[in-house]
Image (spheres, grey):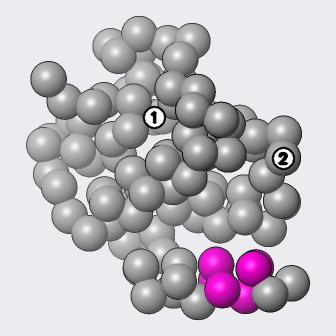
Amino acid sequence: RLPIKWMSPESINFRRFTTASDVWMFAVCVWEILSFGKQPFFWLENKDVIGVLEKGDRLPKPDLCPPVLYTLMTRCWDYDPAERPRFQELVCSLRSAGNA
């Protein structure tokens, strides 16, 4: 079984796995950590996740998540894989956020 609740739309719809889909999943894992281990989209069944994503809905900001980090996470969840940051940019952004 595939981890639907962590997967990008293109991975769910077309089984397309790329570095861009890894960026999406990375941001979901960050969300999971900042949510103290909550399962992403715990309120949905797997079959309903893609509809929510295609409407543009994303995981909510965890209570203790700094706004700058959540903004970065939402960029990782862009529907268009080409618009997501690359890992090199993520590393730089996370370093900057950590030094702020």
Residue picked out by circle 1: 54
User: Which region of the structure is painted magenta?
Assistant: 93-98
Q: Position of residue 85 (x, y in %)?
A: 48, 76
| Left or right side of 21 for 69 | right
Residue drawn 79% across the image and 68% down it: 68
| Left or right side of 80 for 40 | right
Give the overall secondary structure of the magenta segment: helix
Q: Which of the 4 quarters of the picture holds residue 99?
A: bottom right
Asked which secondary structure carries label 1, the reply is helix
* Camera sees residue 77: no
Q: Position of residue 28 (x, y in %)?
A: 49, 46
Q: What amino acid is found at the position of numbered circle 2 in the picture?
A: Leu
Residue drawn 15% across the image and 51% down it: 16
Q: Which of the 4 quarters of the picture holds residue 50?
A: top left
Residue drawn 45% across the image and 34% down it: 54
| Left or right side of 71 for 82 | left
Q: Report crowding for label 1: few under 14, some 14 to 19, many 20 or more residues within 10 A (C-alpha).
A: few
The front one of 100 and 6 is: 100
Q: Measured along the vertical axis of the image, is residue 2 above or below residue 100? A: above
The front one of 40 and 81 is: 40
Asked which secondary structure carries label 2, the reply is loop
Q: Which of the 4 quarters of the picture holds residue 92?
A: bottom right
* Camera sees residue 93: yes
Q: Choose the circle earlier in sequence order: 1 or 2.
A: 1
Q: Position of residue 57 (x, y in %)?
A: 60, 34
* Quadrant the C terminus occupies: bottom right
- Distance of mark 1 from mark 2, alpha carbons? 27 Å
Q: Measured along the vertical axis of the image, is residue 40 above or below residue 63? A: above
The front one of 8 and 65 is: 65
Residue drawn 61% across the image and 59% down it: 73
Residue picked out by circle 2: 64
